[in-house]
Image (tube, rainbow, N blue to C red):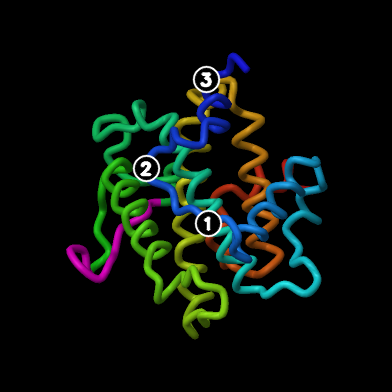
Amino acid sequence: MSNPFLKQVFNKDKTFRPKRKFEPGTQRFELHKRAQASLNAGLDLKLAVQLPPGEELHDWVAVHVVDFFNRVNLIYGTISDGCTERSCPIMSGGPKYEYRWQDEHRFRKPTALSAPQYMDLLMDWIEVQINNEDVFPTNVGTPFPKNFLQVVKKILSRLFRVFVHVYIHHFDRIAQLGSEAHVNTCYKHFYYFVREFGLIDTKELEPLKEMTARMCH
């Protein structure tokens, strides 16, 4: 396994930032293992994302959101040295799409930021959400909040923007690292999942529409 990107992917401790882990013995851990086993077995990604019979939708979604956060984090981490204030002064996906940051604290109005600033705020914001017991309860039996899917939609829409920026502005770096196939697989997995459960508005998917049509038949 000489590819440095894949080494990072398989070395579970080398993530861009701390990971949310599933405790062994919990139902979520079992679900996480099951989802991973399907992927490792080379199961068709369209089938792999489907809710297993008898499982709770919210549990299945929670497991995948955490997993996608870790994977997208890692993808961005591998190209982040080439994503600077100078190279990417605006968080964009080509000339047509500019993403502005808004949160409940410092940026109450949508604010134009550089891509690295936006990514930092985004990853911190998601980390806070997935480590918040009131939003992502770790104890099975603790109910999810009523607005859980709403929060998830926001997280996934924002993670999608990372794919947009990476594919449009940093794909040469991905290719240079020899990690194109891995990133494409992560993207397809993410795309099939959000489509299966209607977790991203179609208009958010526009920037990668042509690529997605070629890649995800």
Q: What crowding class fits label 2: few (fewer than 14 Cα within 10 Å), some (14-19), or many (20 or more)?
A: some
Q: Quadrant of residue 57?
A: bottom right
User: Which residue is under mark 1?
Assistant: 22
Q: Which residues are magenta?
A: 98-108
Query: Residue at point 47% right, 38% down?
Result: 74
Residue assigned mark 2: 17
Question: Label 1 amino acid?
Answer: Phe
CA separation in Å, label 2 and label 1: 16 Å
Q: Main secondary structure of the magenta part?
A: loop
Contact, mark 2 vs mark 3 (Cβ under 8 Å): no
Residue at image x 82%, y 47%? 44
* Mark whose residue sits in front, 2 or 1: 1
Q: Tell me which label, 1 or 3, sits earlier in the chain.
A: 3
Which residue position holds label 3? 4
Q: Residue at x 31, y 49 (%)?
A: 118
Q: Which residue occupies the extreme bottom position in the image?
A: 146
